[in-house]
Amino acid sequence: MIFDTHAHYSDQRFDGDRHSLLMSMEENGIGNIVETGAGIKSTKDAVNLSEEYSFIYAAVGIHPYETENIKEEDMEWLKSLALREKVVAIGEIGLDYHYAVPSRQVQKKWFIRQLEIAKETELPVIIHSRDAAEDTLDIIKTFYPANTGETYGVVHCFSYSPEIAKIYINMGFYLGIGGVLTFKNGKKLAEVVSQIPLERLVLETDAPYLTPEPKRNERNSSLNLKYVVEKTAEIKGITQQEVIDITEKNARKLYRL
Ligand code: NI
């Protein structure tokens, strides 16, 4: 079944139909979902959701945009949540230089601190990195040695070149592939998918965001992953079932399930 490695069902855009939507996943071929925290509240919500639904797991973390007012005591809290049974990763964490705030210095500080927590709790990481390729890699390299055969996490919504993709997979990372693959301007990601072995790719929605074509203007959900499966199968020249099976296996390895 399809494994959605990154979603935000705690988002208020699901307030009207969250339960019925989640209860329809299985009959539509969606097996597991990782509900990803992106701040204090969404992390709390992610853990609650994972404890309510057997097929949902949680990731706990502070997104770079949410780092401005974070304090060390929040990190202790995060670490305590990371020990819960259904928590499978630290994330989403990283760097995003698309806007000027929070400052790069603040973002880096809490990215590094959360990578330390991932090490201490021995959990994989979900990396968010936008317009910050070099700084993200520089920091990650100091935490994770390359070519050890270990898997350390996933670079979510991968947006960089095939060259950078290769550096990450050699370091033991998976690449998260979602709706952008179906966009007209998604050619760079299609190039990454064609060059990187399927064994290194996982599927993700980032729901409610990044809805694939042909539903692009609607709210996203895991039900739309079929369009990403279709496009991946087309690029790789394999069946959709192979894409589903192999990416599911990858996701289980990534989150150690
Ligand atoms: Ni996300």
Image: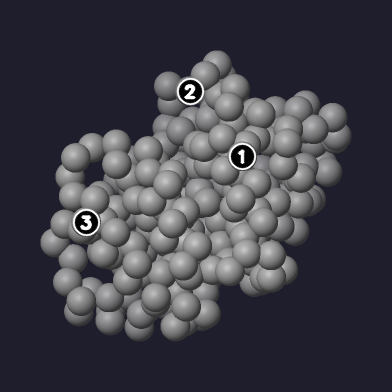
Q: Which residue is mark 1?
A: 163
Along the viewing direction, whichever of 5 and 195 lies nearer the viewer: 195
In screen coordinates, is 164 left or right of 231?
left
Q: Secondary structure at mark 3?
A: helix
Q: Which residue is mark 2?
A: 216
In the rendered image, residue 255, in percent from the top left (x then y), is placed at 60, 67
Which of discs 3 and 2 lies nearer the camera? The answer is 3
- Is the residue marked 2 within 8 Å of ligand 1, measured from its CB? no
Q: Provide the secondary structure element on which disc 1 rests.
A: helix
Q: Amino acid at mark 1?
A: Glu
Q: Position of residue 165 (x, y in %)?
A: 60, 44
Amino acid type indicated by mark 2? Arg
N-term-proximal mark, 1 vs 2: 1
- Disc 3, ligand 1: is the CB inside 8 Å? no
**What residue is rendered at 36% in x and 80% in y?**
79
Is the residue under label 2 in contact with that under label 1 (CB below 8 Å)? Answer: no
Q: Residue at x 67, y 56 (%)?
A: 170
Residue in the picture at 48% in, 70% down: 143
C-alpha distance separating marks 1 and 3: 26 Å
Task: Please identify the quarter of the rendering in which residue 163 is found.
Answer: top right
Q: What is the number of the mark on residue 105?
A: 3
Q: CA distance from mark 3 to mark 2?
A: 34 Å
Residue 13 in the figure: left or right of residue 53: left
